[in-house]
Amino acid sequence: MGFLSYFQLSVIEISFIIFTVFIASIIRGFNGFGFSATCISLISFILPTIEIVPIILILEVLVSVFMIPYIWSKIDWKFVFQILIGITIGTPIGLYLLKFLSPSITHLLICGIVIFFVILQMRGYSNKKINNLPVKILTGGVSGIVNGFGTLGGMPVSLFLLITRVKPMIIRGSLAAIFFLTDAYAFGLSYLGGIVDLTVIYRALILIPILPLGVFIGNKLFVKSKEETYRKSVFYFLIIISVIGIITVINNF
């Protein structure tokens, strides 16, 4: 079995994980986000979250690297660093609140709020007036706090970009850049904290080869899609991930 033995799972379970990562990389190549949310939502049926997250951190950094040729010229770096200010402030707050608040209840609230705003968006709501520095920092802060509780940090930023009617190519490029920087930082902390060990690295190595193919397919789908198709795809994705998150939390009660 070689590397596969590091998963200590059946062939069917390993095949499911590989397939999930492949689909998640297509989603990331198309949306610019959603890789972690997809992987953790589905793979958590097989592996505990604590075992999944370090692997996904490695894959998240690499899937962003594979996206660089497709998105580099479309990144709004000013927006990225404005959001990162908020994320830097919000992340430690989220980690601190984790000691006092129930992650499950918070997860439910976040998913419910996301569904509410997505429905508003699908009914035509938009607001370009909120596209200013204070709101961007606040959005980054909320994203950081949410990230402290789990894997939904991309939702507030993607919703902000959709509400302000930013062009899809800028949305995708900027989100990919944000996640690369934040995930590389998180991976560094995880490595220093001893969370990433040889088993994690070997598990990630099995999954890395399928990432560029998934990103390539996702990018092809994005190039062929119309702006409204992209927005609707992101809306439906956010709703599906939110519903799965709610079901997962309810099942764990």
Image: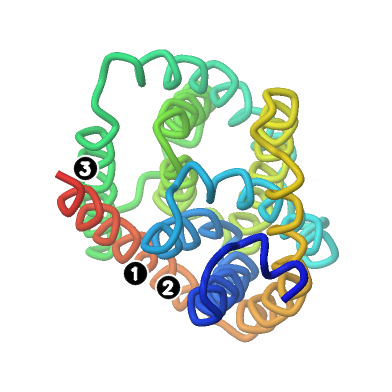
**Colour scheme employed for the rendering of this structure:** rainbow
Residue 237 higher or lower than 10, as above or below: above
Q: Where does residue 209 sit, x and y in percent of width and height?
A: 78, 73
Q: From the viewer's perspective, is the residue at label 2 or at label 3 nearer?
A: 3
At mark 2, the secondary structure is: helix
Marking on residue 233: 2
Q: CA distance from mark 3 to mark 1?
A: 18 Å
| Res 237 quadrant in image | bottom left
Mark 3: give few (<14), some (14-19) or many (20+) Cα within 10 Å. some
Mark 1 and mark 2 in contact? Answer it, CB < 8 Å.
Answer: yes
Q: Where does residue 70 sit, x and y in percent of width and height?
A: 79, 67
* Residue to which mark 3 is pinned: 108
Mark 2: give few (<14), some (14-19) or many (20+) Cα within 10 Å. some
Q: Where does residue 191 sit, x and y in percent of width and height?
A: 73, 31
* Residue to which mark 1 is pinned: 236
- Choose the circle earlier in sequence order: 2 or 3: 3
Comparing 28 with 59, the one in front is: 59
At horizontal 24% and vertical 54% (from top left) the residue drawn is 115
| Res 236 quadrant in image | bottom left
Mark 3 and mark 1 in contact? Answer it, CB < 8 Å.
Answer: no
Q: Where does residue 99 sit, x and y in percent of width and height?
A: 34, 15
Q: Is residue 141 left or right of residue 116?
A: right
Marking on residue 150: none
